[in-house]
């Protein structure tokens, strides 16, 4: 996996989560969360594996009952047996202090605890969770959601705002509350003895402008690593677009050390879809690369044939089938740029810009397809085997270019 860290990326402390560095100069990490009943060990292990294989570098599980807490050490042991090393985060609300106290193996096996001060408060229960984290040398993520803000803090800041000569809009006060709740909780955790580099913060809201504004404020007030994302993005296209808008804005400003797309899955949909969306966002911004990118013509009146669409699909499928092997045999192949273009207007130019590209003939044009490699004309294809011939050229290019970077 290649990395391209922005020169303007916000500085943050590095927090180690189960051997994965978050913040500092580490890559922006992708997270996901299971939606299985954690007490269903078989289903939870299966989904963790699927998320890990898709590229989730940390996976969060719900720990809300005694049965779920008792299952954690078995889940971790089964994952270790199968060679799955993805760190597991415990998601706690309301009764986390009781579960961590009563199930010490759960406290020991989890790689990080997620605490919501809005549901936990900053009282003896919060302190107990922090002390257990210290005893087990675990980091915590203090995550504030606007659906469960600290009501005492909200009341106090609302009252304070009402006394101002020119009061803020109530919505602005709510943003102040989620930011202040996270910061106060972090300061209190440190007062209880938790190390500064054991804390990650997040403030999540459902509105794109709100989550952007809240994280911009928070980023300017601390050096804790920030986990960013919408708290509930929604389903399908709505969720994808909202998440992309929020994450792209923040990441482009250098804000964010770990991300999640909280997508509502359609019935039967692969849970790992949200992981792949994260990968596409990071790759589109040039921050990380996960798989070769294929630029393709959108089609117009010059391309009334569907051939270029079918060829693009076949090229994508071929790459997807090869990637598991390619990533092992050809380090750096993730950065490969491929172009499949539909006519002579942009085709040759786009193909020359890519590492390897083909410019197909548009409607009524000469039925020949020039192939460009590293900006130079390599060959011209024609006939019914254009797709298969191009894929062979692509595979040969990968072998020649990326075999050079294989470790000896």
Image (spheres, grey):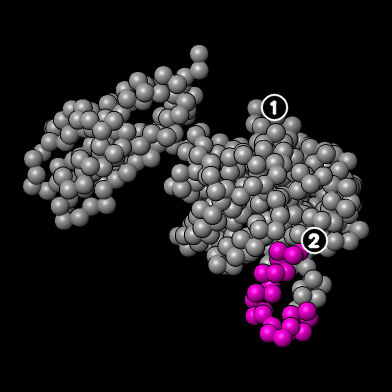
Main structural element of the magenta stretch: helix, strand or loop? helix
- Residue hosting label 1: 81
The percent coordinates of residue 270 (x first, y second) are 52, 47
Relative to 179, does residue 10 appear above or below in the rendering?
A: above
In percent of the image, x 71 and y 50: which residue is there? 224
Q: Secondary structure at mark 1?
A: helix
Drawn side of residue 307 relative to residue 179, left or right: left
The answer to whether one can see residue 376 in this image is yes
Is the Cβ of the residue at disc 1 closer than 8 Å to that at disc 2?
no
Q: 313 or 162: nearer the eye?
A: 162
Q: Is residue 103 magenta?
A: no
Nearest the eye: 122 or 113: 122
Give the class, few, some or many, for how many residues have Cα within 10 Å of label 2's Cα (few <14, many ≥20). some
Horizontal and vertical percent position of residue 209:
55, 67
Where is residue 246 drawn, in percent x and y? 53, 59
Q: Is residue 407 above or below residue 229?
A: above
Question: Which stretch is magenta?
Answer: 159-181
| Residue at which label 2 appears | 184
Crowding at mark 1 (Cα within 10 Å: few <14, some 14-19, many 20+): few
What residue lies at 32% left-to-right and 44% top-to-bottom?
295
Label 2 secondary element: helix
- Determine if the magenta segment contains residue 166: yes
* Residue 197 coordinates in the image, percent (x, y): 76, 44
Asked whether 206 or 385 is in front, the reply is 206
How many callouts does the rendering have?
A: 2
Question: Which of marks 2 and 1 precedes in the sequence?
Answer: 1
């Amino acid at each position: 996996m290649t990395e391209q860290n922005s020169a303007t990326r916000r500085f943050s402390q590095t927090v180690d989560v189960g051997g994965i560095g978050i913040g500092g100069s580490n890559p922006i990490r992708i997270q996901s969360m299971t939606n299985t009943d954690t007490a269903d060990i078989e289903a939870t292990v299966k989904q963790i594996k699927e998320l890990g294989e898709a590229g989730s570098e940390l996976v969060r599980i719900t720990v809300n009952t005694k049965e779920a807490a008792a299952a954690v050490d078995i889940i971790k042991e089964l994952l270790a047996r199968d060679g799955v090393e993805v760190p597991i985060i415990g998601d706690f609300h309301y009764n986390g202090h009781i579960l961590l106290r009563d199930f010490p193996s759960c406290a020991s096996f989890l790689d990080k605890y997620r605490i919501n001060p809005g549901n936990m408060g900053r009282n003896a229960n919060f302190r107990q969770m922090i002390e257990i984290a210290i005893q087990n040398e675990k980091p915590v993520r203090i995550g504030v959601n606007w659906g469960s803000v600290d009501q005492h803090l909200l009341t106090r800041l609302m009252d304070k705002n009402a006394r101002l000569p020119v009061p803020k809009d109530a919505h602005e006060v709510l943003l102040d509350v989620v930011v202040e709740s996270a910061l106060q909780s972090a300061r209190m955790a440190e007062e209880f003895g938790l190390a500064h580099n054991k804390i990650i913060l997040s403030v999540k809201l459902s509105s794109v402008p709100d989550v952007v504004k809240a994280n911009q404020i928070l980023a300017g007030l601390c050096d804790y690593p920030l986990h960013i994302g919408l708290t509930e993005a929604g389903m399908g296209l709505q969720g994808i677009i909202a998440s992309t808008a929020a994450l792209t804005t923040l990441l482009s400003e250098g804000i964010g050390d770990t991300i999640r797309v909280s997508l509502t899955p359609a019935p039967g949909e692969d849970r790992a879809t949200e992981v792949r969306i994260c990968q596409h966002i990071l790759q589109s911004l040039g921050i990380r690369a996960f798989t070769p990118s294929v630029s393709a013509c959108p089609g117009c009146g010059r391309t009334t044939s569907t051939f270029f669409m079918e060829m693009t699909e076949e090229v994508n499928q071929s790459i997807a089938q090869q990637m598991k092997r390619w990533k092992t045999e050809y380090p750096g192949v993730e950065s490969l740029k491929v172009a499949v273009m539909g006519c002579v207007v942009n085709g040759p130019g786009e193909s020359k810009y890519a590492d390897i590209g083909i410019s197909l003939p548009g409607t009524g044009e000469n039925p020949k397809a020039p192939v460009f490699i590293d900006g130079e004309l390599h060959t011209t294809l024609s006939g019914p085997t254009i797709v298969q011939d191009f894929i062979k050229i692509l595979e040969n290019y990968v072998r020649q270019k990326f075999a050079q970077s294989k470790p000896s």
